[in-house]
Image (spheres, rainbow, N blue to C red):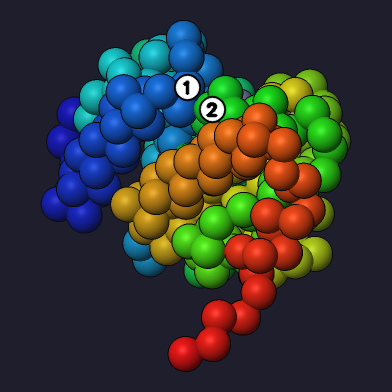
Amino acid sequence: MAYDSVEMSLREKLAETAIRAYRRGLVNGTGGNVSARIPGRNEVLITPTGVSLELTTVDNIVKTDLYAAPADPDSPYKPSKETGFHCAVYRVRPEVNAIVHVHPPYATAFSHRFQDLPLVAVGASAGLKRVPCIDVALSGSTELRSLVEEAFSKDRSIKALLMRAHGIIATGPDLVAAYDVADLVEGTARIAHLVVGLGIPVEEAVEVAFRPIPR
Ligand SMILES: [Zn+2]
């Protein structure tokens, strides 16, 4: 396939990000999906359904419009079944240009509390501010898309969401930033798990992480 230079470069970065996420252990099997908005166009590139993120290539990435309709009818690959919620975020948050949706174990375990992720370290409190949790809904459903859309519209400062019994959605102005948010969310969940294991109340750890530090 021939792509213009802007699209080609974004396809390369998207494949690189998807492979990084897989190798970092943020996702297993064929789960998860990564997308990016093509600059200046109402089009989105997203990883294909049914293919492990580790096997993402420039040519199996799928292009859709901002309403999840495939833009290339000749492609043998189908867009991820979660394309609907990716597009919903791009529509409501114009500053978001990349989304990493993964199922990392510690953050997904914390999603079962159905509460905000406890931001127990200063890097997380400063970098994430708040990571709310949305309720469980079927993958690919209109209900899940609405829950995601509502969460990202209601609090326009959030960069990431926990999805109950499912995983996380991380966003950013570009693919590297969205990947870093996903990695920070999972790293923070790991620390929170260790804090709990040490017998320290998680609320106390959050309070310390948000306490203003005198200069
Ligand atoms: Zn998922």
First in sequence, mark 1 or 2: give its number: 1
Q: Compared to 185, does 50 lie above or below? A: above
SS type, badge 2: loop
Q: Residue at x 61, y 64 (%)?
A: 209
Q: Nearer the viewer, residue 92 or 192?
A: 192
Task: Give coordinates of residue 147: x percent, y percent.
Answer: 81, 44
Q: Residue at x 47, y 14 (%)?
A: 28
Q: On the rendered structure, is 123 left or right of 150?
A: left
Q: Compared to 62, does 121 lie above or below? A: below
Asked if residue 146 can be seen in this view, the reply is no
Q: Residue at x 72, y 64 (%)?
A: 207
Q: Amino acid at mark 1?
A: Val
Task: Give coordinates of residue 102: x percent, y percent.
Answer: 53, 30
Task: Give coordinates of residue 3: x percent, y percent.
Answer: 19, 41
User: Disc 1 designates what residue?
Assistant: 27
Quarter of the figure with the N terminus: top left
User: Disc 2 designates what residue?
Assistant: 104
Task: Give coordinates of residue 141: x percent, y percent.
Answer: 77, 27
Q: Compared to 71, does 74 lie above or below? A: above
Q: Residues within 10 Å of mark 1 (few under 14, many from 20)?
A: many
Q: Residue at x 40, y 45 (%)?
A: 179
Q: Amino acid at mark 2?
A: Pro
Pointers 1 and 2 in contact (CB under 8 A)?
yes
Q: On the rendered structure, is 108 left or right of 59?
A: right
Q: Residues within 10 Å of mark 2 (few under 14, many from 20)?
A: many
Q: On the rendered structure, is 190 left or right of 34?
A: right
Asked if residue 33 can be seen in this view, the reply is yes
